[in-house]
Image (cartoon, grey):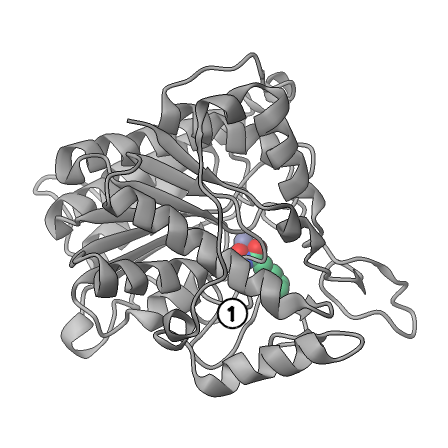
Amino acid sequence: MRTGYVWEELYGWHDTGTHAAFVAPGGLVQPHRHVESAESKTRFAALVEVSGLGAKLDRIRAVPAAEDDVLAVHTAEHLERIRAGSAAPRGGDAGDGTSPFGPGGLEIALLAAGGAVQAASAVVTGRVTNAYALVRPPGHHARPETGMGFCVFANAAIAIQHVRRHHGVERVAVVDWDVHHGNGTEEVFAEDPDVLTISVHQDQLYPKGTGRLTDRGRGAGEGSAINVPLPAGTGNDGYLHAVEQVVLPALERHRPDLVVVASGFDPAALDPLGGMVVTTTGFRRMARAVLDAADRLCDGRVVMTHEGGYSPVYAPLCGVAVLEEMSGERTEVTDFLAEEYEDLPDQALRPHQAEAVAAAAAAAGLQRAGAAL
Ligand code: 3YP
Ligand code: ZN
């Protein structure tokens, strides 16, 4: 059984235009590229092919998400806003001024959501064991009534609702290792006890005010959201500690039929937006841990949807490391930056990081007897 892989050239054409990082230019803000440019993804897709890995993967073609799949998550007003911007000569913005798209952007955003849908469908129907949807624009910040944080549609949430509505999937767990809080996915499923959302992120980076460890879901979904805010500067051992102490026991407790990973490579050491220092080793270890848990819980059914990660040089190396773990294949790609970042003192688990993880475990009711804070 194989690993599915989604990538479409059109994802590289999603046009975020000129911004300075994510700030609109004007006055003393000199125009530059928007930080969510195509390169970190097109170079990831290029490395998949050049490394030979692409030939070993089961290529899944994206098709645009159906309107009713989008409307299972978003309001009609949001879809119409994107449609209108997409038809305008200079494009539009998904809602917050940091999430621009060019003319025709609706088609690309639907193809991103649809790529996640096809990847998830291939996994739950048994066509492949697991799948990576390298999609763009990203999705984990998009809320039912608006896009935000570079996200237009909530790709992972749309895929989850699709497989629950069409393929009999009931229980799903989302593991979001993007450096930012997966607020959109959390909000979509906040009241749903069948979909557990776990977000491991840099504390109060983005969005402001969400992703606190006390945010645990609402109503019938109380306890079905878990947040693990980590202090800036966390590295490989800190991230693995969070996975082992919170993510894995939460997955065991939830007993999902499918695990969805919101895979952002912006916790990486070279990332311009995040303040973490994770290397390919850390992403590889997190992927391995989640894949092994899924083997125990749901026949290895894992679908990853691509989120952030803004180093055009380093994100592709992280992505190939994760794809190697998913597929069991090995390439000759080496992390040519490892010697610079692998042995940083910051890679070791620090006491304040262990405290943050213990607090998140306690808030989630996962504290094991005898585990000291
Ligand atoms: C959105 C505006 C400021 C930070 C930015 C975060 C985008 C991202 O990578 N989310 O996962
Ligand atoms: Zn991010």
Q: Is residue 121 above or below residue 24?
A: above
Please indicate, yes or no, whether residue 260 appears anywhere in the rendered image. no
Q: Residue at x 53, y 42 (%)?
A: 265
Where in the figure is residue 268, as x and y percent of width and height? 56, 38
**Residue position marked by numbered label 1 in the rendering:** 208
Find ligand 2 in the image and state its quadrant: bottom right
Q: Report the amino acid beneath label 1.
A: Lys
Depth check: 329 or 60 in front? 60
Where in the figure is residue 281, as x and y percent of width and height? 47, 24
Where in the figure is residue 221, as x and y percent of width and height? 19, 71
Please indicate, yes or no, whether residue 171 appears anywhere in the rendered image. yes
Depth check: 252 or 46 in front? 46
The residue at the far bottom in this view is 77
Q: Residue at x 21, y 35 (%)?
A: 293
In terms of image quadrants, where is residue 60?
Answer: top left
The residue at the far left in this view is 369
In terms of image quadrants, where is residue 363?
Answer: bottom left
Q: Residue at x 29, y 43 (%)?
A: 123
